[in-house]
Image (cartoon, rainbow, N blue to C red):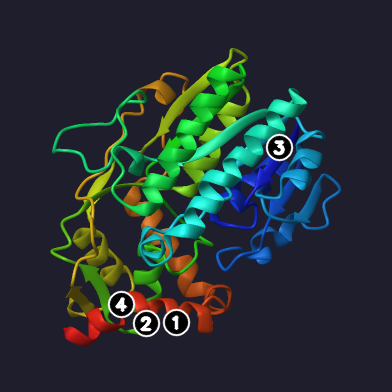
Amino acid sequence: MRVLVTGGCGFIGSHVARALVAAGHAVTNLDALTYASNPANVASIAAHPRYRFVEGNICDSALVRELVADVDVVINFAAETHVDRSLLDPGIFVRTDVEGVVSLLEAVRATRTARLVHMSTDEVFGSLAPGVEAEEEGQFAPTSPYSASKAAAELQVRAYAETYELPVTVLRSCNVYGPNQHIEKFIPLFITRALAGVPLPLYGDGLQEREWIHVDDIVAAVGLLLEHLPGAAGAHAIHIGSGERLPNRVVAEAICRLAGRDESLIQRVEDRPGHDRRYALNSRRLRSRGWRPAVRFEEGLERTVRWYAGNADAWAAAENPEFREYFARQYGERLGAV
């Protein structure tokens, strides 16, 4: 199978790209090499005869159409994904997450030979009440510029699937963690700061509940779904969730223990605006196809802490002036007020 992976130098995209090459597929990686991209994530396959890297943006419609014409499947991981950054610069999220998806849809519509698999998020449903799980056909209720951009992208997917009779698969995942994730995200941020012995800025009361899944389980789910992509027109949604849901405070405490640090490093700071309290996905549809998460959160978190502890050079490079400026804007006053 010939696969175009967009955002293949990012966190999830790089794991999927490496797995696809290992499984015998030909992979083209289209990545704009933004701050969250790291070519080192795909260094192990860079010289592989079934792998090709193309630097470019999914909003470049001419380039996207050229690449889509040569593949069987497009898997879209290219996106602005961090809620905190969406609060600081919403516009870039609309350009990448909405306009970029329209660019991909237009290319798929023009060629009619490639199927699109689009990565979305559980955050399109907004905050859920205790005991409630979002179904694939659930109503959207996004509350941040990030989640709104992903919901808007999904609406475009639905419109194209209906109007132009395209078969599109939409994957909605819970929070993903594991090696190679950019250090601005919650788990790697807290791991790297705990390892350095500096305060961990925990929003509000820390009781916001998130569902966590290891990146290896995402890769396995994508691999399974690629074998059974629907041929019928429509936006076919699939949820990828682990069922393991924990308050952020509990995750922070576990990171401190694994890093050998005292929990006093956890500093409660002013909450961010519109912070959702709870996410939860109903993943029965995927499980009915034989998929099960293989990495329990306790094991996966321990492995992830070990990876960051043993690969300081890999994540230290991300602590560049751009990241320090972002961290100061998002957390500087909050930590200073503690």
Q: Are marks 2 and 3 in contact (CB under 8 Å)?
A: no
User: Label 1 belongs to which residue?
Assistant: 325
The amino acid beneath tag 4 is: Tyr
For label 4, the crowd category at 10 Å Cα-Cα, with few meaning under 14, some 14 to 19 and many 20 or more, is some
The outermost residue toward the right is: 49
Please, what secondary structure does the residue beneath circle 3 have?
loop
Whichever of callouts 1 and 3 sits on the residue coming sooner in the sequence is: 3
User: Label 4 belongs to which residue?
Assistant: 331
Q: Residue drawn at (27%, 71%), measured in percent from left and top?
A: 256
Residue 194 lies, in percent from the top left, at 33, 77
The amino acid beneath tag 3 is: Ala
**Which dot, 3 or 4, sits closer to the camera?**
4
The amino acid beneath tag 1 is: Glu
Q: Are marks 3 and 4 in contact (CB under 8 Å)?
A: no
Within the image, what quadrant is residue 36 found in? Answer: bottom right
Whichever of callouts 2 and 3 sits on the residue coming sooner in the sequence is: 3
Instruction: Tell me how far mark 2 sits from mark 4, CA to CA.
Output: 5 Å
**Which dot, 2 or 3, sits closer to the camera?**
2
Whichever of callouts 3 and 4 sits on the residue coming sooner in the sequence is: 3
Q: Residue drawn at (74%, 28%), measured in percent from left and top?
A: 110
Q: Which mark is on residue 328? A: 2
Please, what secondary structure does the residue beneath circle 1 have?
helix
Residue 166's place in the image compared with 335, above or below, is above
Q: Are marks 1 and 2 in contact (CB under 8 Å)?
A: yes
Q: Residue drawn at (30%, 77%), measured in percent from left and top?
A: 331
Say left or right for 293 vs 96: left
Q: Are marks 2 and 4 in contact (CB under 8 Å)?
A: yes
User: Label 3 belongs to which residue?
Assistant: 23
Quadrant, the C terminus: bottom left
Residue 4's place in the image compared with 166, above or below, is below
Residue 104 lies, in percent from the top left, at 65, 38
Residue 291's place in the image compared with 316, above or below, is above
